Image: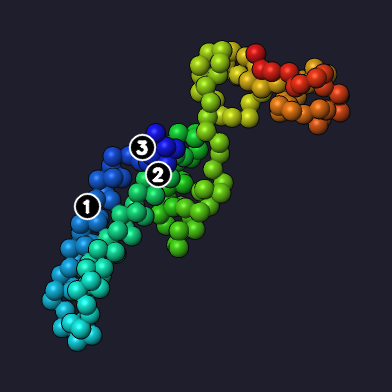
Amino acid sequence: MSRFREELKVIPRTARSIAALAYVAVGAMFSLFVMFSHDKDLSRTPELGKIFIMVFPGLIVAVYVLIVGYVYADAKRRGMRYGMWTLLAIFIPYSIGIMLYFVLREPLMKACPGCAQVLKSGYTFCPHCGASLQPTCPSCGRGLELGWANCPQCGTKLPGPTPRAV
C-alpha cells in the first residue's frame, strides 16, 4: 500500500462525513443558483461550464474539511496540541494555518524497544525504563547520529562506525 493511502486512513470518519455533507450541501446550493438564476450571462454559459459551477465549489469545501481533519488526527498522533492546530487550520485565512502546521509539525512518535511505551522522537534514553534509544558518545554520553566520526559536543573521536543503540 502506498504511503499516501496510509496517510489518508488517518483522517477521522467524522471529518469524512462532514466533508461529504459539505460537498452535497454546497453542490445543491450552486445547482439551485444555476437552475433558477435570471442572469443573462449565466444562461449563455455552456452546459459543461454550468456543471463545473455546480461541482467545483463543493469539491473545494470538501477537500478543505478533509485537510483540517487530517491536521487534527495527525497532530494528535504526533503528541502535539491537536485542538490548537485544528483551530489554527480552520481560522487562519488563505490556508496559512494549514501550511504552518506542515512546516512546524513534530516527527512521529516511536515505541521504546525496551518497554514499548510511545515516546516523542529525539530522546536519547527512555524516561520510563532507561533503555538507550539512539547511540551515545562514550565520553560525554550525549546522543549521536549514525555515521558521525566525532562527537559534536565534546569532539571525541568515535570508534569505527557509530555505536548502535541497544
Position above or below: 50 against 56:
below
- Report the residue at 45% width, 58% height from top: 95
Instruction: Rate crowding at label 2 as few (under 14), some (14 to 19) or many (20 or more) other CA atoms within 10 Å.
Output: many
* Residue wearing tag 3: 9
Residue 82 appears at what percent x and percent y? 45, 41
Residue type, numbered disc 1: Leu
The quadrant in which residue 152 appears is top right
Q: How far apart are marks 1 and 2 (CA)?
A: 17 Å
Contact check, label 1 and label 2, Cβ < 8 Å: no
Residue type, numbered disc 3: Lys
* Residue wearing tag 2: 70
From the viewer's perspective, tell me whether residue 82 is left or right of residue 44: right
Which type of secondary structure does the marked residue at label 1 adopt?
Answer: helix
* Residue wearing tag 1: 21
Name which of mark 1 and mark 3 comes first in the sequence: 3
Residue 146 appears at what percent x and percent y? 71, 26
